[in-house]
Image (cartoon, grey):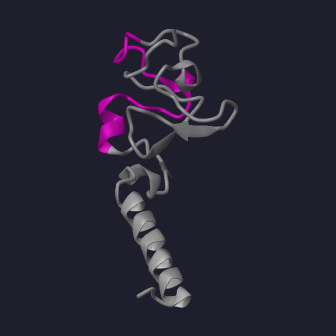
Amino acid sequence: MPQPVSRLVSRRQALHTLTGAIGVAFLPRHVFAAATTLDVKDPAAVNVGYVEDASKVDTKKYSSYTTGSNCENCLLLQGAAGAAYRPCEFFHGKLVAAAGWCAAWTAEM
């Protein structure tokens, strides 16, 4: 015996909602986290000599630094070009200064 139309719509809506909830459950965690700016005093930043202004790199301590290298021309930087702060693959969930630098700097290919 067929069920009333109103009950079928309710089941469809429930199934649609459940399907969406399951899909959201499998999204990566970083999709939900609001990115924050990396603090230069953060232990991870200190460990690799991160600075927000590449001209302030301690060249005695970081001899790998070359003039002109900065986050803007690093392979690990993500996001839209031109933004002052952008996501970095090295510092997951954090935004770094495009004008900055750290020892994880990798030349773009």
The overriding secondary structure of the stretch rendered in magenta is loop
**Rendering coords of residue 102 (x, y %):** 42, 26
Closer-to-camera residue (22/71): 22
Image quadrant in which the N terminus is located? bottom left
**Number of numbered discs on residues:** 0
In the rendered image, residue 22 lying in the magenta stretch gets the answer no
Which residue does the image show at 33% across and 28% down from the upper left?
48
Q: List the single residue furthest toward the front.
A: 1
Q: Quadrant of residue 105?
A: top left
Closer-to-camera residue (78/2): 2
Q: Which residues are magenta?
A: 43-64
Q: List the single residue furthest toward the right.
A: 82
Vertical side of 16 occupied by 107: above or below: above
Which residue does the image show at 49% across and 9% down from the upper left?
66
**Rendering coords of residue 98 (x, y %):** 59, 31
**Rendering coords of residue 3 (x, y %):** 45, 88
Closer-to-camera residue (64/37): 37
In the rendered image, residue 49 lying in the magenta stretch gets the answer yes
Vertical side of 56 occupied by 69: above or below: above
**Rendering coords of residue 74 (x, y %):** 51, 20
Which residue does the image show at 56% across and 22% down from the upper left?
55
Closer-to-camera residue (107/6): 6
Which residue does the image show at 49% across and 20% down from the upper left?
75
